[in-house]
Each structure stands twice: as structure tokens, then as C-alpha cells.
Image: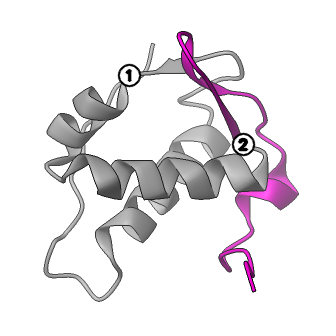
Amino acid sequence: MITIDWKPDKNGAEPAYRQIVDYISRKISGGDWTIGSILPSQRVLAERFGVNRSTVVRALEELCSYGVLEGTTGKGTILTSNTWSVLMSTAPPDWG
């Protein structure tokens, strides 16, 4: 079961979406969230994190690009990998 017991620091040096990426990565690498776990909806995540939905979407898209999560229409977002090398990637992808 996915438990969210944290909110990003809106006054922090890192953007909120990046803090969310780091939080989720820590939960996965720490074994708190396991492969096959289904994340709450984007709206629920936004509410729990205290951010707007677009911030959550950006964080989830980044994690999907790393291969950690997979979003499926109608089924939600599923944790698909806990590969150490994937989780340790700190630089965002170069979309250029």
C-alpha cells in the first residue's frame, strides 16, 4: 500500500516537482513501495502533496521517462522498476 507522509517545501531551492521525484525515488529504493504498487490518482497525489496537478504530472512523467513508473489509461500509474541505476539518475533527461 502506498502511504504519503510528506509534502514538498514550496520555499526550497529545488522545484516542487523535483522534490516529489526525489521523495518517490527514496520510497522505492528504501523498499517502502514495491514493484506492482499502484499510485493514487494524479488528483489525489496533488492533494496529498499540497501542489497543483500539473506539478504531479511533471514529476510522474520524469519517473516514467526513467522507466520506474508506467502510466496506463484506466489502470493508473504502476511502479514497474526499482533498478538502482534508474533510481540514482539525478539529471533530468535531455529532451533537446
Instruction: Please name the residue that numbered disc 2 is placed on.
Output: 68
Q: Residue at x 29, y 89 (%)?
A: 13
Q: Position of residue 10 (x, y in %)?
A: 15, 72
Q: Residue at x 84, y 45 (%)?
A: 83
Q: Are there few (<14), some (14-19), or many (20+) residues within 10 Å of tag 2?
A: many
Q: Quadrant of residue 90?
A: bottom right
Q: Position of residue 59 (x, y in %)?
A: 47, 56
Query: Of the residues under marks 1 and 2, which one precedes in the sequence?
Result: 1
Relative to residue 53, is residue 38 depicted above or below?
A: above
Q: Quadrant of the C terminus?
A: bottom right
Q: Amino acid at mark 1?
A: Pro
Relative to residue 71, is residue 95 depicted above or below?
A: below
Instruction: Please name the residue that numbered disc 1 is placed on.
Output: 40
Residue 15 on the magenta span: no
SS for callout 1: loop
Q: Residue at x 76, y 39 (%)?
A: 82
Q: Amino acid at mark 2?
A: Val
SS for callout 2: loop
Q: Which residues are magenta?
A: 69-96
